[in-house]
Image (spheres, rainbow, N blue to C red):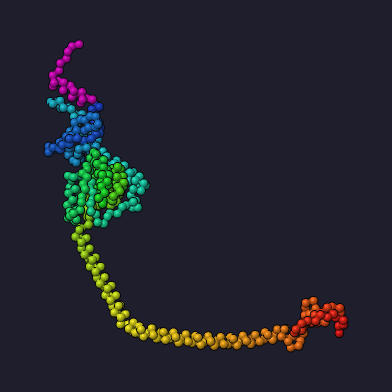
């Protein structure tokens, strides 16, 4: 086989010709993740498009005239339309971009988030029944945030201004990017194991929704829910509303507001205590004054001043009533005795034995007093009872 030797120029020209004539390298779509995005003042855009295993250089010349987005950044998922370009002079291979379309990665994330919200709501993680109340006068708080972030400094400075000697426990955690959700979860768990801490603040300062997304992760939401200590979600700015906000016991619009909600102003507490002390003293003084007036009134009362005399009068009245009662009883007894005597005489007079004493007798037949002749017959034995004895007879004739 005859040896063929090309010059570099010849070889590059041959490659370019092959690429230009091959329809597979013209007007095609590619999708991947952006890296090394650079906008030049010349109006050209250069970047690298990559996936898990490979990458390719891309260029968009005069990108402003091609309506290409001017806010592309590292990590964005995009779809491009273009052609393969080969620069002969340098032997560079790249894709010449005609159009760029952002992949709706965020939209997909929000769709998953809404599904997760629905599931957690059904489990009861958002229910007010499980919300814990913040302590009124905390002595120590725990904070999960980035030690180097603005949120940390805002929390510490605001807390010191409100209550200068409050204890603050910081768990420094990544709050965005890979590994952030794991560190936030760990921070909440660690601070829950410190007995002195009264409540926890977990959050960060503002940023894009992608920057705040760690607080939309299921693992973080469940860590908020599991917290045995009351927990405040303090993420982003006031317009942001994240999954951690829904699960937390209290939601603060910003880290600074979290301190304003959870930590009272020491001077206000002191003023309140002084005001309460004043009200209590005034109340005690009023009660004492009222009781003193009542005592003075009782002291001057006629009945108390004449108490001995009143008792003597009552005793005399009691003696009088006793005498009346005694006299009334004696009269009643006499009347009852006289009535009893009359009744006794009547009863005695009705006694059959008393009749016998006056010479009368009682005739009986068969142990029954005879009242009619028809009650006996001739030959019957009868008994005649006298005052001092009885006579037994036999009936011979009835007339």
Quarter residue 394 falls in: bottom right
Furthest toward the front, the residue is 388
Residue 113 shown in magenta: no
Residue 263 is situated, as x and y percent measured from the top left of the image, at: 22, 55
Horizontally, residue 311 falls left or right of residue 188, namely: right
Residue 100 is situated, as x and y percent measured from the top left of the image, at: 22, 37
Q: Nearer the viewer, residue 247 or 273?
A: 273
Q: Which residues are magenta?
A: 1-22
Quarter residue 392 falls in: bottom right
Residue 3 shown in magenta: yes
Residue drawn at x 68%, y 85% as measured from the top left = 348
Q: Nearer the viewer, residue 38 or 266?
A: 266
| Magenta region, main secondary structure | helix
Residue 144 is situated, as x and y percent measured from the top left of the image, at: 23, 46
Residue 303 is situated, as x and y percent measured from the top left of the image, at: 35, 83
Question: In the image, is residue 149 above or below residue 386?
Answer: above
Q: Nearer the viewer, residue 312 or 215?
A: 312
Quarter of the image containing the N terminus? Answer: top left
Quarter of the image containing the C terminus? Answer: bottom right
Residue drawn at x 76%, y 82% as measured from the top left = 389
Question: In the image, is residue 280 above or below residue 215?
Answer: below
Residue drawn at x 18%, y 54% as measured from the top left = 165
Residue drawn at x 26%, y 57% as measured from the top left = 136
In this rendering, does residue 47 appear at all?
A: yes
């Amino acid at each position: 086989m005859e040896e063929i030797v090309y010059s570099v120029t010849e070889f590059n020209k041959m490659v370019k010709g092959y690429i230009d004539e091959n329809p597979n390298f013209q007007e095609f779509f590619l999708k991947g993740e952006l890296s090394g995005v650079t906008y030049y003042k010349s109006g050209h855009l250069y970047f690298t498009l990559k996936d898990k295993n490979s990458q390719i250089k891309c260029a968009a010349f005069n990108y402003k005239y091609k309506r290409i987005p001017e806010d592309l950044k590292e990590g964005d998922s995009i779809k491009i339309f273009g052609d393969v370009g080969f620069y002969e002079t340098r032997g560079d291979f790249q894709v010449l971009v005609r159009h760029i379309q952002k992949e709706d990665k965020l939209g997909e994330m929000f769709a998953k988030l809404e599904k997760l919200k629905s599931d957690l709501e059904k489990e009861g993680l958002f229910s007010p029944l499980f919300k814990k109340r913040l302590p009124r006068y905390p002595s120590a708080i725990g904070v999960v945030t980035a030690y180097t972030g603005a949120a940390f400094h805002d929390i510490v400075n605001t807390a010191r201004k409100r209550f200068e000697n409050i204890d603050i426990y910081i768990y420094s955690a990544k709050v965005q990017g890979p590994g952030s959700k794991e560190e936030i979860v760990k921070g909440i768990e660690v601070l829950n194991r410190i007995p002195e801490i009264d409540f926890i603040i977990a959050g960060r300062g503002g940023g894009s929704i992608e920057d705040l997304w760690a607080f939309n992760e299921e693992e973080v939401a469940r860590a908020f829910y599991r917290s045995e200590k009351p927990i405040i979600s303090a993420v982003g700015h006031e317009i942001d509303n994240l999954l951690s906000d829904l699960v937390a016991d209290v939601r603060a619009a910003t880290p600074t507001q979290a301190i304003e909600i959870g930590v009272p102003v020491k001077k206000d507490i002191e003023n309140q205590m002084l005001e309460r002390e004043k009200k209590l003293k005034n109340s005690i003084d009023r009660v004492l004054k009222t009781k003193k007036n009542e005592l003075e009134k009782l002291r001057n009362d006629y009945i108390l001043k004449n108490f001995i005399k009143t008792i003597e009068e009552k005793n005399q009245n009691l003696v009088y009533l006793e005498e009346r009662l005694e006299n009334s009883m004696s009269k009643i007894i006499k009347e009852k005795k006289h009535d009893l005597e009359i009744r006794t005489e009547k009863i005695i007079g009705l006694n059959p034995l008393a009749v016998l004493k006056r010479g009368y007798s009682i005739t009986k037949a068969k142990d029954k007093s005879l009242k009619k002749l028809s009650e006996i017959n001739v030959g019957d034995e009868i008994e005649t009872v006298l005052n001092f004895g009885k006579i037994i007879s036999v009936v011979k004739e009835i007339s």
